[in-house]
Image: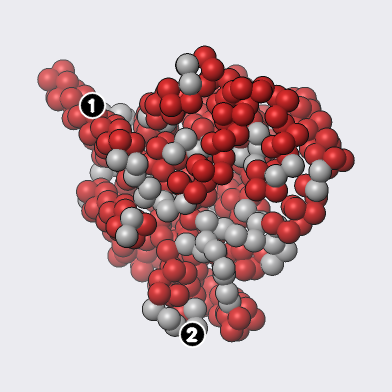
Amino acid sequence: MVLKTKMLYKKKLFLYIIGSFSLILGYAFKENSAGGGLHDFNILSPYILKFSKEGFSVINEYLSNDSTLIHSPFFYYISGKLSNLLGGFENFRIFYLFLCLILPYIYFKILDEKKDSREINIYLLSFLIFLSPYYRTSAIWTLGDNFSLIFFGLFTYFLIKGEKYSNLKYFLLSLIFLVFCSYTRYYYATFWILYIYIIYKQFGFKIVIQQTLFSFILSIPALIYFGYIFSNYNFLSLLENQSSFNFLKNIFQILSILFFYILPFILIDLKNFINFYKKQFKILIITLFFVTLFIFIEGLHYKINLGGGVFYKLNYFLNLNYPIIIFLSVFFSVLSIIYFSESKIQNYILFICLIISFSQNTIYQKYFDPLYLFLFFGLLKSRILDRNILQKKIPIVLVLLYFLFFLAFSLIYYNN
């Protein structure tokens, strides 16, 4: 038994070293697998340098730029301070690259809470982060996405522990990390709804009131900040321009993107998926009706200038006049979410939080990758996923190959 454990540990360490080395190699060769990494770096990195030299006095210049106003300055201010401590921006970039290597470990610890870490299948699943073009791009080009995901991962980890052991201490840690995450990326704040729902289930209404008051205290700096930019800058008009009130179209984009990540798990569990809808044929018909209705309402003039995800790009690349690929991806995305959610309110609240988070006009696939891993295998309460994936009942290597192909395609597509 001891020998088997040591062998498994060596396999885990080997995989982690391979993934880490690939990221370092990507940094050395200036990998840009997500396409927009270099562009974002050129716009945002100067502010890290300015914060490092001028401190918080540069905030007015930062807020005067419409390209940066929509972003929280938290990451760039912290990065500027760390650049000074580490002796320069390039040293900070290397530090940040290694800091991002914490994220796969956090994800592994999340899986570890749900299943015995001796299962090599779990470690293979955590290796998926290294195959994310967006994780790699954020690490290599010093973008704040991974910084916020580290906090989101810790929020998820302590939320799972709090729920598992019914321990309020873990819930408080979870809330604190969610606050830090939201200070880095505003849109994560909606997951507070899920947090409060779980608190209510665990402890009742009295603790909900306490947690709400504590949340309000933690959010006071953000409220002061938003009050300042609403009063002194054009943040409200910019927010109106950036945000989309066409929630149907937004939901369509989000569901289409999500299905790209759900697809390999559905294909592996296809037999059970089909059998489920043979028994639940009414749900299939109702879903088909509403998705088709939307297509007739929006489909004839369905156009996205930027973003939209893989299936939208595929529909556009094939020059199809009708968004049939998007229709199919949304239809099967809804069926998949119903299948994995198992009629649990908590799971539907999770997806509602996700949809509310992204109400802007342009929705990029990078918003969901590698976030989907923390959603599907951390926050989603699904016996189907646990049984068919975490308990080694699927060939996880096929899932790795699916996402490896996506990474390879992204590298080729954005470097031609």
Q: Residue at x 81, y 31 (%)?
A: 224
Nearest to the observer: residue 40 or residue 359: 40
Q: In this view, does 78 lie to the left or right of 102?
A: right
Relative to residue 308, is residue 160 depicted above or below? Answer: above
Give the labeled residue for mark 2: 321
Give me the C-alpha separation between circle 1 and circle 2.
49 Å
Q: What residue type is labelled 2?
A: Asn
Work out whether residue 302 can be spotted. Answer: yes
Crowdedness of circle 2 by 10 Å Cα count: few (<14), some, many (20+)? few
Q: Residue furthest right?
A: 231
Relative to residue 38, is residue 110 depicted above or below? Answer: above
State which quarter of the image contains the N terminus: top left
Q: How far across and how far down the image is residue 320, in percent?
A: 44, 82
State which quarter of the image contains the C terminus: bottom left
Helix, strand or loop status at disc 2: loop
Give the labeled residue for mark 1: 13
Q: How far across and how far down the image is residue 368, in percent?
A: 49, 50
Q: How far across and how far down the image is residue 72, in percent?
A: 66, 37
Relative to residue 316, is residue 38 depicted above or below? Answer: above
Crowdedness of circle 1 by 10 Å Cα count: few (<14), some, many (20+)? few
